[in-house]
Image: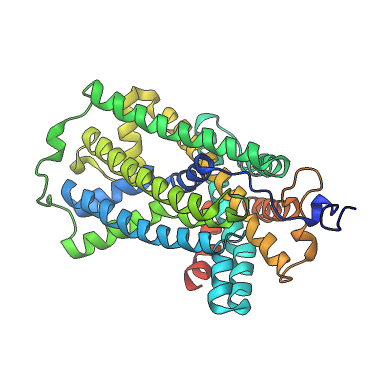
Amino acid sequence: MATATSIAPASTRGLRRELGLASTTAAVIGGIIAVGIFLTPAGMAKALGSPMWLLAVWLVVGSMTLSGALCFGELAGRFPRAGGAYVYLQESYGRRTAFLFGWMCLLVMDPAVTASLATGLGGYFAYIFPLRQLLIKLVGAGVIWGLCLLNIFSIRFSAGFIRWTTWLKLALLGFLTTWAFAFHLGSWSNFVPFVAQRPGSLPLAPAIGVGVVGAFFSFGGWWDVGKIAGEVRDPGRTLPRALLFGMLAVTFCYIVVSAVFLYLVPLEKVTSDQTFVAQAGEVLFGPTGGVIFAAIVIICLVGSLAALIISAPRVYYAMASDVLFFRAVARTHPRFGTPANAIAIQGTIASLLVFMGSFEQIISYALFIVVFF
């Protein structure tokens, strides 16, 4: 005779472990590489004034981030449940701290990051196809809900989408590198002097501070993969490897892309982050360079949004499973086996923020609370 467990409906069972090493590694890379790599190298290079110091900052911050990622990989293997940092805080400091963190994620951090990425995506889309402000917001909200529906429909399809967008990101960045060097579009003299700081750069100590802040911003997001530990096959083995491979790939990518930008645009001609990207695009592709770079940024942002939307709702699912949120949020979809209610909550709050504020206002809404926590 069947037991009660064997005939339990899908809505009361746990999440399905369907993610392998490739999907998990893609989630790490996809969650990190967004618009940051197109914005931060200019400010870092201008402040440091030295290719050698820029390389050193990327390597040091990459190593520090890798150390943190490996710690999270060990924690994810020890506590292979949905929720990531929420679970680790609960195990280390108790339910009260986990409760505060979970609600901060629910109301502030996750929807604000989602909304800011979607708002930025809408802005780059409008650069290619001029749109009114309302339509820009509709594009951002539309992308959020498209990805939410994909996540509700299937974790495997969502993971496949993340894999393809991540490999496409890396392929496009590789194409930029090959195009620049193969056709000799820049100058190796831009790297000379390699060690000494150029006139106009900051004194070394504050310059390193600016560089480290920019690098940490660019590496942000690696911790989100722990939130999907409940859907990873053999998490004790897969998650540490995914974090290791992902962080090594991102560090290598950031160093190469920064080198390409320096090769294309001399440091003395760098005025701001945005003009730096436009200058590099013009050298690579002529007058249409800005449009091409905008398209590449959109692809990077879609991939990052997909990684964020697959990971963030697992915190709310874990909270509801621990009776720290509405129990209905802990139910999985009876057909698809995904935390549909948790995903819908993130999509709803993020969409409201998209319509309520600008990119700067959304960031201001979240920054103080997140940093304080």
Q: Give x and y (percent) for residue 218.
A: 39, 51
The vertical placement of 63 against 271, above or below, is below
Quadrant for residue 250, please give it.
top left
| Residue placed most toward the observer, 250 or 213 | 250
Is residue 42 shown left or right of residue 123? left
Q: How is the structure coloured here?
A: rainbow
Picture residue at 12% right of the left edge, 52% below the top: 197
Q: Which residue ends up furthest to the right in the rendered image?
A: 1
- Residue sitting at x 54%, y 68%: 88
Instruction: Locate residue 95, reporting x and y percent.
Output: 63, 77
Can residue 371 be seen by looking at this rendering?
yes
Measuring from the top left, give residue 194's x and y in whole percent.
11, 45
In the picture shown, does residue 213 fall above or below 270?
below
The answer to whether 281 appears left or right of 54 in the picture is right
Q: Residue furthest top?
A: 183
Image-based side of 37 in relation to 258, left or right? right
Q: Residue at x 62, y 50 (%)?
A: 231
User: Is residue 272 something one can see in this rendering?
Assistant: no
Residue drawn where x is 86% and y is 52% of the image? 7
Which corner quadrant of the image does residue 294 belong to?
top left
Horizontal side, residue 153 vs residue 361: left or right = right
Residue 88, relative to residue 124: is it above or below? below
Residue 14 pos. (x, y %): 72, 55
